[in-house]
Amino acid sequence: MFYDRLKIACKNAHTTVTATLKAIGVGTANGTYWKNGSAPSSDIVVKLAEFLGVSTDYLLLGKKDTKIEITPDAVELISAYNSVDMLGKAMIKERALTLAERAAEERAAEQRKKTVQSAAPAADEQPNPEDDEQEQSDHCVIPYYDYPASAGTGLFLDETIAEDLTVKATPEALTADFAIPIDGDSMEKDFTSGDIVLVKSCPNIPEGQIGIFVLDGDVYIKEYGGDCLISHNSEYKPIMLKDYGLSICLGHVLGKAKAIKKDRSRRK
C-alpha cells in the first residue's frame, strides 16, 4: 500500500510522514486518508519522491530504484541542452518536467484504477445493505469547499475550511484534488446549479477545456477560450480576461461528483 511505502521511505530518510508533509506544504490530514487506502495526486507523489530521494515508481508501485543507463538518445539530448543559451535550457527543462509529471500522473491513475478493481466484490456476491456503513471500498473521500463557483470569494481553497465529502469512487473522483458546488445556469446543459464538480488542481488547462477560474477574487466555472472564458449558455457573453487585473486557473473540471455524504466538521 502507498502509505506503507511512504512510511518506509520516511524512516530511511530519518524523518516521519507528518514532518515530511509539513516540509513540502501538504496538509498532514492527508496521511490519515492514505493510511486508510487512498492515494495522493501525481503532483504530491512527485514532491514526496523528490524530498525523500526515492522514485515515484517506488512510492506508487513498490519498484526499487535501479541504476540509470545513459543511452545514446540521452547523450544527444544532453548535448543539445548544453549547446543552447540559458533561455533555451529553461525551456527544455520545463518541457521535460511537464512530460515527467504527465507520466507520473498516468501511472498514479492506473494504480488507483487497479486499487478500485481489486476492491470490487465478485459477481456472485450479493451486497448486504446492513454492511453499507462498514464496506466503503467503492467510496472515496475528497476535500469539499462549500463556496459555489461563479459566486464565491476566491478564498475557498484554504484547507482549514474544507469539509470531507464522501463520493462514489469513479476514475474522475480518484484523480480529483477537490470538489466544489456550482451556482447559476451559465454552463447549462453540461452543468446546472447545485451540481458538485470534481476538480484536478493545475495552473493552466488547454483551450476548449472546462476549468475553475478566479477573476479579481470571484470564482467561475467556464470553458477556457485563450483570451476569454466561455459560457455554454448562449445568453451569457464571453468574459474577456484583459478586463481583469488578476486571473488564475485553479484546476481542470473532470466531471460531476456522485456525492454520498458530507462530514460537516472542518479540517484542522
Image: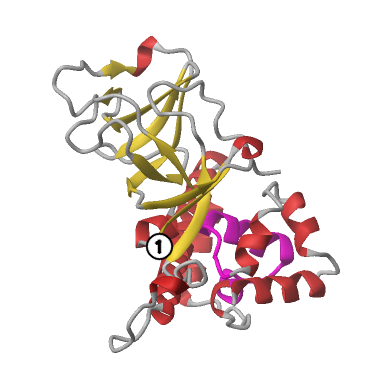
Location of the C terminus by quadrant is: top right
Location of the N terminus by quadrant is: bottom right
95 and 261: which is toward the camera? 261
Which residue is rendered at x = 72% and y = 60% of the image? 51
Q: Quadrant of residue 117?
A: bottom left
Magenta-colored stretch includes residue 50: yes
Whether residue 84 appears in this view of the structure is: no
Which residue bears the numbered disc 1? Answer: 169
Whether residue 4 appears in this view of the structure is: yes
In the picture shown, does residue 72 fall above or below 233? below
Residue lying at the far top of the rendered structure: 243
In the picture shown, does residue 16 fall above or below 214? below
Could you tell me which secondary element the residue under label 1 belongs to? loop
Residue lying at the far front of the rendered structure: 130
Left or right of 197? Residue 63 is right
In the picture shown, does residue 192 fall above or below 11? above
Which residue is rendered at x = 39% and y = 33% of the image? 212
Magenta-colored stretch includes residue 86: no
Residue span colored magenta = 37-59
What amino acid is at disc 1? Ala
Q: Quadrant of residue 190?
A: top left
Which residue is rendered at x = 57% and y = 70% of the image? 37
Q: Residues within 10 Å of mark 1 (few under 14, many from 20)?
A: many
222 and 266: which is toward the camera? 266
Left or right of 62? Residue 80 is left
